[in-house]
Image (tube, rainbow, N blue to C red):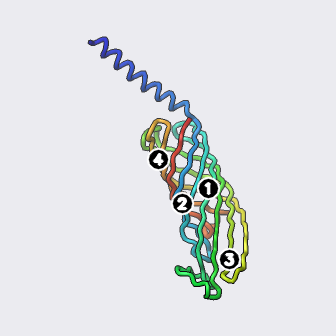
Amino acid sequence: MRRGLGFLVAALLLGGMLDRADAQEQHFIIGGGGGFATLFDPRLDLGRGTNLEGFFGFRVNDQVTLEVSLDYTGVTRVFTEFGNVVDETDPQTVGQYELDQSRYHLDGTLYYHFGRRKPFHPYVFGAGGLERRDTTITTFEGDIAKESEHDPTFSFGTGFDYYALYNVAVRADIRWWLPGFDTDLRTRRLFFGVGYYF
């Protein structure tokens, strides 16, 4: 009886050691998710759009992770010629126009996690990258104008990982992008995603 109990304890300890060893060997992460982002503009109230992101990274240790990500947010709103938001459009009203803006972010991000890897693992991060803004303005008279702009960006934020499994982490965070360090064109995003370590 004692010998069987000893074997059981040894097996459990060995299994835990193997799991921890596997976790330490899993340095790469791939994942994605979505959320909501608010797009700011000094002239117009662009409001909130749907956000999507994919990411790939390398975990240096329990605290430090490096990631590359591609992020997209799009909004569509109708404005008067004076820049006021139109809730109910009327094609007969002269001067109204529809604005579509898409923002793409390509970032390299450095994450710092607090403490050792555990089910709840909070972090802060900073990043540098590029932003592309594609804007299309369509009037109800049929005129179309398009514009694309590119800016270097700095972004930062905070969030947490929750390890549902030893190699699967659910992620939630908030991020601010500042294109060219210009707060008038900033983007604020609330993100929910999942990452797989391998």
Q: Are marks 3 and 1 in contact (CB under 8 Å)?
A: no
Distance from disc 3 to disc 4, alpha carbons, whole Å, reads 44 Å
Query: Of label 1 and label 4, which has the lower sequence position?
Result: 1
Element assignment for label 3: strand
Q: Which residue shows up at 34% across the image and 20% down it?
A: 9
* 141 with respect to 74 (left or right): right
| Relative image position of residue 145 (x, y in whole percent) | 73, 75
Question: What's under tag 3, amino acid-wise?
Answer: Thr
| Relative image position of residue 55 (x, y in whole percent) | 60, 47
Question: What's under tag 4, amino acid-wise?
Answer: Pro
Split into 4 quadrants, where in the image is the N terminus?
top left
Residue wearing tag 1: 71
Q: Are marks 2 and 4 in contact (CB under 8 Å)?
A: no
Instruction: Name the foreground residue: 98 vs 125.
Output: 98
Instruction: Name the foreground residue: 61 vs 19.
Output: 19
* 117 lies above or below 71: above
Query: Of label 2 and label 1, which has the lower sequence position?
Result: 1
Query: Of label 3 and label 4, which has the lower sequence position?
Result: 4
Distance from disc 2 to disc 3, alpha carbons, whole Å, reads 26 Å
Distance from disc 2 to disc 1, alpha carbons, whole Å, reads 10 Å
Query: Of label 2 and label 4, which has the lower sequence position?
Result: 4
Q: Are marks 2 and 1 in contact (CB under 8 Å)?
A: yes
Element assignment for label 4: strand
Residue wearing tag 4: 122
Residue wearing tag 3: 138
Residue wearing tag 2: 189
Element assignment for label 1: strand
Query: Of label 3 and label 1, which has the lower sequence position?
Result: 1
Indicate the quadrant where residue 28 lies.
Answer: top right
Q: Which residue shows up at 54% across the image and 38% down it?
A: 197
